[in-house]
Image (cartoon, coloured by chain):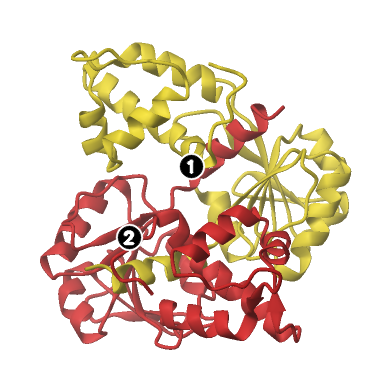
Chain colours: A red, B yellow
Amino acid sequence: MKKDIKIPQATTKRLPLYYRFLQNFANAGKQRVSSQELSEAMKIDSATIRRDFSYFGALGKKGYGYDVNYLLDFFRQILDQDEGANVALIGVGNLGNALLKYNFQKNHNTRIVVAFDTKAPMEGHEINGIPVYHPDRLEEMYQKYNVELAILTVSSRSAQMIANRLAAINAKGILNFTPVRLNVPDTMKVMNIDLAVELEALIYLIRNSD
Amino acid sequence: MKKDIKIPQATTKRLPLYYRFLQNFANAGKQRVSSQELSEAMKIDSATIRRDFSYFGALGKKGYGYDVNYLLDFFRQILDQDEGANVALIGVGNLGNALLKYNFQKNHNTRIVVAFDTKAPMEGHEINGIPVYHPDRLEEMYQKYNVELAILTVSSRSAQMIANRLAAINAKGILNFTPVRLNVPDTMKVMNIDLAVELEALIYLIRNSD
C-alpha cells in the first residue's frame, strides 16, 4: 500500500465490506471477480469500487477483473483481520446491553472484553460472561484488559467527561453512539454512529426522491 | 432549494446534524454563526460545511457568516422536521429491543409505532407501550399504522425475505441493521448501519494513523 496516500474515511468504511464480500466470493469457489460483480453484490456503484481500489495501487487487470484470493490476502493484511482487538464497552443501558450480546466476532477476533456501568459494583459482576466494573475503575481496567478502543453508550451528559478520561490515558479510539460530538486530541480516532441522525437522513431521502 | 441538483448521500446524512447544532446555537441566543464556529462544534471541516451549504444555494454572506434563524427555518423545511414519521421495527431481538426503548423522539415526531417479531402472538402484545405483532400480519399492520419506513433488526437469513415483502407493498425505506446487502427496487431507499463494519473501520483507522 502506498503509505503516503491519505485514504478518505468513506473508503475506509467500505474496506471491511470488501473483505466480507470477497470472502463470500471465495467461499462460492470464485477465483476472479469484476468490479461489476462486486458492485451488484455490494450495492455500491462500480466506479466507486474502482476508485477505492485505486488508492491501494492498480489491483485489477482490464478484461480479467480482480483475483479473489489476491484481493482477500491484500485486504486481510490491510485490515489486520487476523489480529483482532480488545474492546471496552462504557455504559450498559439498553443499547449497551444489546451490544454486549451482539456478536461482533463473526469473522475475526475483535470482541468486548470488559464493560463499565455506574450501576455495577466496585468489585465487578458479569453480564453475558463479560466483566462489568464501576467506571471509577476505568483507567485501571483499561490497562489490565489491554483495551484498544471503547464503545461509548453512556448518556449525553457523561460522554465528554468519559472521553476526557480516555484521552488522559492515551486511548486510541471511540465508537461513539451518543449524539455528542466529542472533543478529543488528534491522536484519538472517533467514529460516530448516531441512530436518530441516520433515521432522519433516511426520511429525508424517502421524501426527496423523484 | 434547487430541485434539479442531486445531493450526495454524505451531505444528506449531515443535514439532521446541521439542524441539531443550529438549534443549539439558537438556544444559546446566537443570531449568526460562521462556518468556522459550526466546524468546531460539529467536528466537520469548514470547507465541507461550505460545500454542503452550496448545494442549497448561497446561504451565507462573506464576513457575516450565516443567519442562525434563517438557516434553522431552511433546514426545518428541508427535513420536514415538524411532520414526523411512523416507523415500524421488524425483529425484536437484543438490538431491536434496545431500539424500542431508545428515544428517537427528542427533537421531532418520528417514532416507532408498531413492531413485529416471530415470538409475538398473532393478536399482538405490548412492549414498552408499543404493539408487537407476529410477522404474518406485517402487510396488514403496515397499512393500518400508516408506516413510512422500517427498521430491520431481524436475522441475516430473514432479511431479504422481509425486504421482498416490504417491496411488494411499496414500502419506501429501510434502516438496515443486518449485515445483508438488500436487493430492493429503485423506489425503495435503504440506509445500512453495520455495527461490525463500523468497528472494523475504526480499528483500521487507529492502526493506520501516523
Q: Where is residue A178 in the image (x, y as percent from the top left)?
A: 36, 50
Residue lying furthest front in this view?
A62
Relative to A10, is A166 on the left or the right? left
- Is B142 on the left-hand or right-hand side of A193? right
What residue appears at the point 65 percent right and 59 percent down from the top-left corner? B153
- Rounded to the nearest angstrom, the CA distance separating label 2 from label 1 is 18 Å
- Amino acid at circle 1: Ala
B114 or A208: nearer the viewer: A208
- Nearer-the-camera pick, A190 or A50: A50
Q: Looking at the image, is A180 positioned above or below residue A49?
A: above
Q: In this view, does B119 lie above or below A176?
A: below
With A76 as the anchor, is A160 left or right in this view?
Answer: left
Q: Where is residue A179 in the image (x, y as percent from the top left)?
A: 36, 45
Which residue was labeled with disc 2?
A6
- Asked whether the residues under marks 2 and 1 belong to the same chain, the reply is no
Q: Can residue B81 be seen in this view?
A: no
**Chain of the residue under label 1:** B
* Dot label at residue B10: 1
Q: Nearer the viewer, mark 2 or mark 1?
A: 2
Q: Quadrant of residue A10?
A: bottom left
Compare residues B43 and A179 and report the one nearer the observer: B43
Chain bearing mark 2: A
Circle 1 Cα neighbour tier, 10 Å, few/some/many (<14 / 14–19 / ≥20): few
